Image: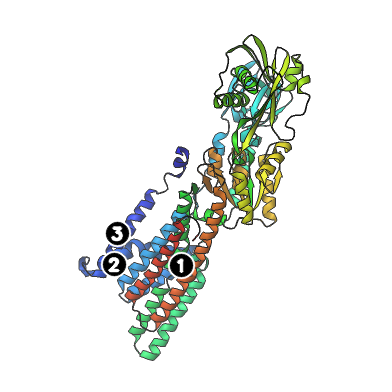
Amino acid sequence: MAKIREKIRGIVSDEAKFRIVRMVISAIALVVSLGRWATLPFGLDMAWIAIALCGVPIVVGAVKAVVTEHDITADVLVSLALVGSLIANEYFAAGEVALIMEIGSALEDYTAAKAKSGISKLVEMLPRQARVRRDGHELVVGAEEVRVGDTVVVHAGETIPVDGKITRGETSVDQSAMTGESLPVDKGVGDQVVSGTINGMGVFEYRATAEERDSSLQRMVRLAEEAEKSKAPIVSLADKWAAWLVIAAATAALVTFCVNWAVLGDTSAAFLRAVTVLVVVCPCAFVLATPTAVMAGIGNATRYGIIVKSGEALQRFGAIDLIAFDKTGTLTQGALKVSAVESLAPELGSDDVLRFAAAAESGSEHPIGRAIASECARRDLQVPAASGFRVLAGRGIAATCDGHEVLVGKPDLLAAEGVNLEPTASAWREGRGETIVLLAMDGQAVGRIALADMLRPEVPTAMKSLQTEGVKTVLLTGDAEVPARELARQAGVSEHISEMLPEDKQAQIKHYQQEGNKVCMIGDGVNDALALATADAAIAMGGIGSDVAIESSDAVLVKDDISRVPYLIDLSRRTLAKIRQNIIISLCINAVATALAATGVLDPVIGALVHNAGSVFVVLNSLFLLRGGKD
């Protein structure tokens, strides 16, 4: 939670705070103006405060947009109403319109998409230094100084600086950042290693096959930058229709003036009615229709453990028809757990197999050892003391325990140590995608343990809910085919693709988009950053997720609860429906008010209040989204 809170700090900047102060002062001034309780020096109306603080910036912005960018925005129409009201000496109406527009603009800015820092997080992951062996000496140089052919030395716990091929030593490499694989991958002489992955144990040397600028992690940075640039922003609804609104308002005001001048023969009265039309036609409720609904939707999502970063993002989720899931840490719990234990010796029970395996693994920091120790603790088993540990990189571990020679590891380790593997000949838990380790004591195989990254319990129900909503579900993972297929079956996803690198996931997302799908990606690791940045909308796991995944996403599941995803999709669709409802109602109110203004029923002050009532209705209607469940 602390990490999530850190991500959302600083939303209210100094500029935003000053804007709030301006709006509060303007609102107070308008109340005083309406009650005629005080005036400014020289007898000026108090509404001039709102006009100066909120109206002037709108007029300046409108003029700038028209002159420098040749763009007609909603501010142009507001400026016309402001100027007309001032000419007619209707200062309250001018100030009220300016304040409402400023509130709408502030809400839009508040819910606008904030620049993501996922790219900077990727850059921070780039190794700064590398150990290279030159002329018989080990030197520490900048990662950018490594050249193809250099011998690079990597110690335990260090990040591999550039791509290369191992020339000396054995190790276990944590590739989760790049591939999403839950288990470290054993590496030996001749195996390829890539930048951004972490050496899990011992020291090894490798020959660099690429320079830092051409490394796998640098390639991810470049692809992520390109993906972010390709996302088109959602244009404000009021600005999208601004040109037509300006034409319609100007036409209505002109027709009102001409008809009333012809009928009444009074230029002043005709002008006043035309100004009233401009005031009531101002798109304040129209401007508020989207940001108020979006803010209410975001507030609702937050109450249900979902942090949505922007209004644009919430709107995009409503159009999603395909969701791609990462496997490790997203659909699974992100950590190995013991799924089954079998004793192969009649004198040993399954608890004994775990106890002796945990005793041997107590000399290792390997995830398998931690999972076995965790299972012993869960079962409240006493683990005997062990000594004489021998860590065999990439294969297993040996130790002495209660006078027995104990081996824990893969079948090839046990075979190399002369262990009788005949008891393990029978098939056990095949096709489940689990990791199987064997336990041998005094040269005899006596047990086997199955480990797996377990599926989150809420996933199958969530998949059914999404499919009921018409959303296709896909699993994209760097894992091998067997575990990917088994997990896809358990989860109930529609489709799965295995053995994918980060750029493969990105390419698959683009493929789905080219087929006409609106794609959401859900992931937790650095390896998902490219896909998250490329998708139309992205969700990161907040508890287990990496900083890069969280920064590259549009929404964060605070408690890593996948069951919240169907709720978010439904909430987004309800938000879009509420926006449409707000727009229709605001247009209807404007149409009635325009007719009343044109016929003289409303003067500018009353017109401003009616206009304000429409804005209030839109806000109150949007607040229904704060309630849980459906409207």
| Left or right: where 98 falls relative to 297 | left
Q: Which of marks 2 and 1 is nearer the N terminus?
A: 2
What is the C-alpha distance between the residues marked 1 and 3?
24 Å
| SS at badge 1 | helix
Name the residue type under label 1: Phe
| SS at badge 2 | helix
Whether 156 is drawn above or below 263: the answer is above
> On residue 47, which mark appears?
2
Residue hosting label 3: 25
Q: Is residue 461 visible?
A: yes
Name the residue type under label 2: Ala
Q: Where is residue 8 in the image (x, y as percent from the top left)?
A: 45, 45
Q: Is residue 70 visible?
A: no
- Bin the neighbour count of mark 1 within 10 Å (Cα to Cα): few under 14, some 14-19, many 20 and up: many
Residue hosting label 1: 286
Of badges 1 and 3, the one in the foreground is 1
| SS at badge 3 | helix
* Residue in front for this viewpoint, 28 or 98: 28
| Left or right: where 447 falls relative to 585 | right
